[in-house]
């Protein structure tokens, strides 16, 4: 997809590129790479996510220089960062809110893929790599939340690591192995710190594979059809997509800055400013907002093992999505019924997030059960059946010349729908 | 449709925050000087608040992450260098070991951390009937409701408990406390301290002053944060306009029928 006729102009560039064609690689993939010219702003979140990852790595490296991974010292070392390290408060607030921004962006990115069918052939591997990145992100975020060693750190870690004790026969040994002892304690903290430092670099590696796999078939697009071979449907990545991604990124940074500078603690839990105390259990143990839907699924099942299986199932089922969706049409723009179910899924996940923050009792428990059931029904029953039963709208033959195979006026509707609202 | 979903997302985000123990009254909303985009502390208020902390709270509550030097730093109470030295020197700090290997007491210096009232948590509990007065360094951030909540608890002692409520020995009714029960007796009464600047030391005034001080203690770089934040956002807004115009110009070369 990104063959290039690029030749470096400088003598050193030529000398170097003949020995290691890095310049050719960058030119092909970051400049000439042909991109559909009809991409909308929902496609800018890939670039935004790259920015988030790099921001987390840079701020994280600086924080690690001042942080002490020890049960007795972690909390006070965070206060040291907030008070005495030059701009330590800024670096920490960027890192803590950056995690939330990272998840906000990744959820938009995932739902964009769901709406436009970006996970379908020939892009299954891109999708699977993306889900693996998402799983690693959750692991990194969870372990990062433990590091300040506040009350939610400690009790969140206790709840989540205890899930593994639900595994039959070996559960208890596995949990003790994870803890490095008989409860969440200093050995747990030090290993979480080590892994929290490792995982972002694994994510970085997967991101490179994700982009590599993307650049084989090229981007999907809002119309969801294959591009014409002559290149009339595409623009070079630079400057067209670069400038558009940059514009979206700057808008995203304004929201990000709003949180960092004016509401830096609104996304966290106030209990995490109380040092961890194994003898005092908080009234309500809740994870960070981005993990709440899965927490709701976990608690919706009365059986511990069942809850754990469903929670992990809710994530892993996404890996099978390219094969669960049987529709030949990619974009929901041309799938009137799927579109309704798509928004229902969005609502379902938001409802799960909401009940995840509420106590698991009474009406909340009932709602979480219904929402959990819909989540699985959506993927296991609706997606496969809809491919056979749904009557899709006529799809244009090309994104440049929207000649519709039959009927008329549909493309105008498609254009409106592209904006997603 | 999209708007509706973002509205619900926003609702979910804030509702997780608002979710606190059910039976306490909603905190009193105070129009703090440090609220808002240009929020700043009132120096005189922070100095008065420090006086309340020092003369009342500090007899039970530690503030172990602050140093005396912080009292003179920019964005805080901004006591003068001499005042900070005098405040520090009024405490006896344990230091050592010296050349003979012995611990000794000396007058405090600006670099020292605030001296804690008790040597350890057990000592604090034994004196306070089993309750542990929490460290006040980050107390404002450690309570849902923040400054408004702290102020409200200080103001929440005056009402009588409902008749069906049983109040045990050593426990006090408080309208705003989670569970409506608190182990701290009413800490402030009119005239508990005498302000040198002539301000009337009413319970409400002292509660506001000490809450402002505790807010600064929990977030000593608040003023700088808001100042940098404003500049950053203005910069990004201007930058976004420039990028937007560049984008329009670049894309005008492409025919998009879309």
Image (tube, rainbow, N blue to C red):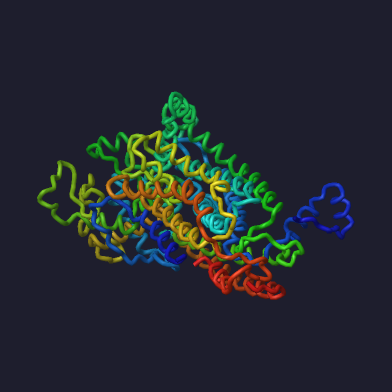
Q: Nearer the viewer, residue A205 or B179?
A: A205
| Position of residue A16 measured from the top left corner of the image (x, y, whole percent) | 85, 50
Residue B126 visible (yes or no)? yes
Residue A126 vertical placement versus A280 (above, below): below
| Position of residue A94 measured from the top left corner of the image (x, y, whole percent) | 53, 54
Q: Quadrant of residue A169?
A: top left
| Position of residue A175 measured from the top left corner of the image (x, y, whole percent) | 45, 29
Residue A158 vertical placement versus B80 (above, below): above
Q: Quadrant of the N terminus of chain A?
A: bottom right
| Position of residue A58 measured from the top left corner of the image (x, y, whole percent) | 61, 50
Q: Residue at x 46, y 62 (%)?
A: A262
Going by the image, does A38 lie left or right of A86?
right
Residue A307 vertical placement versus A14 (above, below): above
Q: Nearer the viewer, residue A342 or A20?
A: A342
Q: How many marks?
A: 0
Going by the image, does A229 lie left or right of B192?
right
Q: Nearer the viewer, residue A89 or B136?
A: A89
Q: Residue at x 22, y 56 (%)?
A: B156
Q: Residue furthest left?
A: B163
Going by the image, does B6 lie left or right of A238?
left
Q: Nearer the viewer, residue A151 or A221?
A: A221
Residue B206 visible (yes or no)? no
């Amino acid at each position: 997809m990104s063959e290039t006729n690029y030749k470096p102009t400088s003598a050193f560039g030529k000398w170097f590129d003949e020995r290691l064609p890095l310049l050719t690689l960058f030119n092909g993939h970051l400049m000439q790479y042909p991109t559909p010219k009809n991409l909308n702003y929902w496609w800018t979140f890939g670039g935004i996510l790259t920015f988030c990852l790099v921001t987390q790595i840079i701020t994280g490296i600086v924080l690690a220089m001042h942080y002490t991974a020890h049960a007795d010292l972690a909390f006070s070392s965070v206060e040291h960062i907030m008070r005495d390290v030059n701009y330590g408060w800024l670096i920490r607030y960027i890192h803590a809110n950056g995690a939330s921004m990272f998840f906000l962006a990744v959820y938009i990115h995932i739902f964009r893929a769901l709406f436009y069918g970006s996970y379908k052939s020939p892009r299954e591997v891109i999708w699977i790599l993306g889900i693996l990145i998402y799983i690693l992100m959750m692991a990194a975020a969870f372990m990062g939340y433990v590091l300040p060693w506040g009350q939610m750190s400690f009790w969140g870690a206790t709840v989540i690591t205890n899930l593994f004790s639900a595994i039959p026969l070996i559960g208890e040994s596995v949990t003790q192995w994870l803890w490095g002892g008989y409860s969440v304690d200093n050995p747990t903290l030090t290993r979480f710190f080590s892994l929290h430092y490792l995982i972002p670099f694994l994510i970085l590696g997967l991101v490179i594979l994700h982009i590599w796999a993307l650049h084989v078939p090229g981007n999907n697009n809002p119309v969801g059809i294959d591009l014409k071979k002559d290149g009339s449907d595409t623009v070079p990545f630079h400057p067209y997509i670069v400038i558009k991604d940059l514009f979206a990124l700057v808008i995203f940074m304004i929201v990000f800055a709003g949180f960092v500078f004016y509401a830096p603690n609104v996304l966290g839990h106030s209990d995490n400013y109380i040092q961890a105390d194994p003898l005092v259990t908080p009234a309500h143990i809740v994870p960070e907002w981005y993990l709440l839907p899965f927490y709701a699924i976990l608690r919706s099942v009365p059986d511990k093992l069942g809850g754990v299986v469903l929670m992990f199932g809710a994530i892993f089922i996404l890996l099978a999505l390219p094969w669960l969706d049987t529709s030949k049409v990619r974009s929901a723009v041309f799938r009137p019924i799927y579109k309704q179910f798509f928004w229902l899924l969005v609502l379902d996940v938001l409802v799960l997030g909401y009940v995840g923050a509420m106590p698991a009792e009474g009406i909340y428990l009932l709602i979480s059960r219904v929402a959990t059931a819909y989540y699985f029904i959506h993927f296991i029953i609706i997606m496969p059946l809809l491919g056979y039963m749904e009557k899709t709208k006529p799809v244009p033959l090309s994104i440049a010349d929207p000649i519709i195979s039959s009927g008329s006026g549909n493309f105008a509707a498609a254009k409106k729908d592209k904006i997603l609202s | 449709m999209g708007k509706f979903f973002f509205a619900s997302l926003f609702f979910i985000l804030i509702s997780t925050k608002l979710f606190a123990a059910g039976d306490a009254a909603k905190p009193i909303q105070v129009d703090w000087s440090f609220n808002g985009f240009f929020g700043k502390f009132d120096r005189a208020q922070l100095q008065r608040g420090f006086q309340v902390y020092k003369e009342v709270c500090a007899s039970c509550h530690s503030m172990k992450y602050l140093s005396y030097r912080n009292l003179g730093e920019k964005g805080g109470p901004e006591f003068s260098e001499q005042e900070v030295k005098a405040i520090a020197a009024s405490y006896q700090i344990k230091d050592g070991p010296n050349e003979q290997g012995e611990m000794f007491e000396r007058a405090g210096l600006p670099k020292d951390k605030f001296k804690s009232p008790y040597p350890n948590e057990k000592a604090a509990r034994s004196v306070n009937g089993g309750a542990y007065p929490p460290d006040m360094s980050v107390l404002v951030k450690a309570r849902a409701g923040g400054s408004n909540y702290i102020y409200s608890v200080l103001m929440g002692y005056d009402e009588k408990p409902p008749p069906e409520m049983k109040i045990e020995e050593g426990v006090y009714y408080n309208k705003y406390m989670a569970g409506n029960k608190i182990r701290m007796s009413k800490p402030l009464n009119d005239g508990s301290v005498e302000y040198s600047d002539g301000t009337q030391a009413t319970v409400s005034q002292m509660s506001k002053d000490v809450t402002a001080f505790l807010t600064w203690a929990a977030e000593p770089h608040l003023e700088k944060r808001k100042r940098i934040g404003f500049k950053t956002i203005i910069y990004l807004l201007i930058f976004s306009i420039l990028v937007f115009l560049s984008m329009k110009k670049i894309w005008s070369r492409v025919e998009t029928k879309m």
